[in-house]
Image (spheres, grey):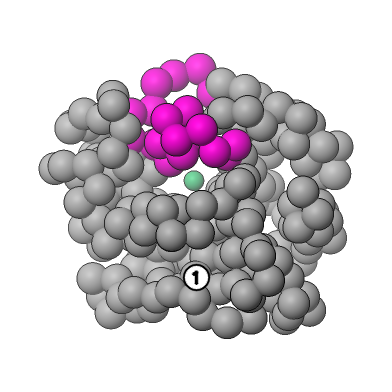
Amino acid sequence: MKILKETLSKQNKKIELYGNDNNNKNLIIGVFHGDEPQGDYLINEYMKFNRNSNLLFIPCLNPDGMALNTRQNSNNVDLNRNFPTKNWIINEDKNYFGGNEPASEIETKFVIDVINTYKPKIILTLHAPYCVVNYDGEAKEISTKISEIINYPVEEDIGYATPGSFGTYAGKEKGIPTITLELDETIDVQELIKPVHKIFDYLSIL
Ligand SMILES: [Zn+2]
């Protein structure tokens, strides 16, 4: 697959968007949180064997956090609280600190740019460790199908407000069906290949 867009993180690590020129329209994003590295491996494995895929992939959105094994990026910002939603606030809780202003981070700007350029129809983000399928926007049917493939329950609402979250930004405010897949981190990532790749296959025919 080709690199369609790339940028450098604060620590000069590459953040890349992969795709083909074949009308790809669904986007999959790995490693929003640096201590949830499964997505990078699972996406790279998929791309090796599906070179003509019509999907768009950002295997690792947060390479600095992945190198540091932190949830946040190297500015101590939780990217999943840094999106310019209507309810964005300065969060004083340092575990969920979303920056001093919305979209302050390179990684956040990159995703916004990708969405504005490629206008994906559906977005899937890969997280860990809760073993659930969350969604924002009109994604109930898709989430149910994903739930059947991986055998995690669907949860429409995680029960608390998440100002600046990607789901609120893309799913609720931009109206793009957005699924947050929370993977099991207690099993070997190899065991996730089969169900997760089946989910990618499913998204490639929608
Ligand atoms: Zn996460």
Report the label total: 1
Range of residues picked out in magenta: 158-178
- Taking depth in this image into account, of 160 and 184 the one nearest to the observer is 160
Q: Is residue 2 left or right of residue 13?
A: right
Q: Which quadrant is the N terminus positioned in? A: bottom right
Q: Residue at x 40, y 75 (%)?
A: 6
**Residue 51 visible in this rendered orientation of the protein:** yes
- Residue 36, compared with residue 23, is above or below; it is above
**174 or 64: nearer the eye?**
174
Task: Please report the residue visible at 77 percent of the width from the left and 48 percent of the height from the top.
Answer: 206
Residue denoted by label 1: 17
10 within the magenta span: no
Residue extending farthest left: 100
Q: Secondary structure at mark 1?
A: strand
142 or 151, nearer to the observer? 142
Q: Answer above or below: position of 145 versus 158.
A: below
Q: Quadrant of residue 67?
A: bottom left
Whether residue 34 can be seen here: no
Q: Residue at x 63, y 75 (%)?
A: 20
